[in-house]
Image (cartoon, rainbow, N blue to C red):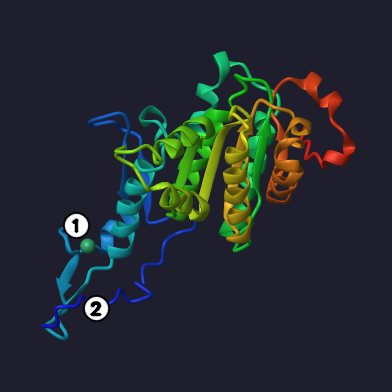
Amino acid sequence: MNNNLPPTPPNQGIALPAHDLGYYYDPHVEVGLHGTVKLSPEVEKYCQCRGITPFMIMDPKSGEPTWCQCRPYRTKVYHIGQYIKRSGIPAPFRYKFLSDFKENYENGQPIPGVNQLKHRFHALIEGIQNGKESLKGFYMWGTPGGGKTFFSYVMLNELIFKFVKPGKFISLSKSFHELRHTFDEGSSTQGQAMSMIEVLSNVPYLIIDDFGVQRNTEWEMEILYNLIDARYANRRMTFVTTNQKVDELKQLAQGRIYSRLLEMCYVIHVSAPDYREMGNPEDKWVDLT
Ligand SMILES: [Zn+2]
């Protein structure tokens, strides 16, 4: 037998009902902090390998091992687990989905803008599902405690879960700290600045949390601009949360960061309705309230 495993046939022939991804999230917690992603019963029906790696069965016709039909779905389940684990989402917020959102935001009180955020995110998901992959993420601004960060976790979990692509959640001040550390003599990450930036420039989904708390040194602004510009060029979806008004962003890196982000993000205001009156029509608000 050839040592190289044959490629997975493109069509596995499992006709799944609409909305069945071939896997689902079972929220029941057996061990740890969250439930598990499982194969959908529809796929299980076709599985003959009983989930034993490398998910192969003996083909009765050829007498040779061949892929079990469950394999593409088991591969997805595996990747979802890996991507969420490495996403930078803090452990208690992994596997939080849109259905969890209501229970978790501020003291059970609805927050202005959040429903609009959900609505907009649904539209984004639907667009991708219909093959209209958009470059545009969200620029979410508003006072602290508006649920922006939690919603970002939810979005990233949803995107990874539904589209099985990697994503990263970063806090800007922490990332700059880590980047600076790569220049320290003898640091465990010495010399890794470029590869860290490379990952962030290319990862399909990036959430930049707490935009605006960075120190705004020339070095930081240059890195930030290059990162955002690279993501723009690579057509990668970017989400930003900030407590700052968009106007304040205009001052960063001579306005270059601001204009790039406006091209890449829908500006969405979360909470604090009094801020809205300060909006300038030129800022191209997507005010969804
Ligand atoms: Zn199988």
In the image, is 48 to the left or to the right of 150? left
Residue marked by disc 1 = 51
User: What secondary structure is found at the residue carrying circle 1?
Assistant: loop
For ligand 1, tell me if the residue under mark 1 lies within 8 Å.
yes
Q: Position of residue 153 (x, y in %)?
A: 49, 35
Judge depth for marks 2 and 1 and give the one in front. 2
Query: What is the quadrant of residue 114 in the picture?
Result: top right
When the figure is inspected, residue 44 is found, relative to residue 212, above or below; the finding is: below
Residue extending furthest toward the bottom: 62
Query: What is the quadrant of residue 115 in the picture?
Result: top right
Q: Position of residue 180 (x, y in %)?
A: 45, 37
Tell me the kind of residue under disc 1.
Answer: Gly
119 vs 18, nearest the viewer:
119
Tell me the kind of residue under disc 2.
Answer: Pro
Q: Position of residue 127 (x, y in %)?
A: 63, 56
Residue extending furthest toward the front: 185
Q: Position of residue 264 (x, y in %)?
A: 68, 50
Residue marked by disc 2 = 6
Residue 270 seen in the current view:
yes
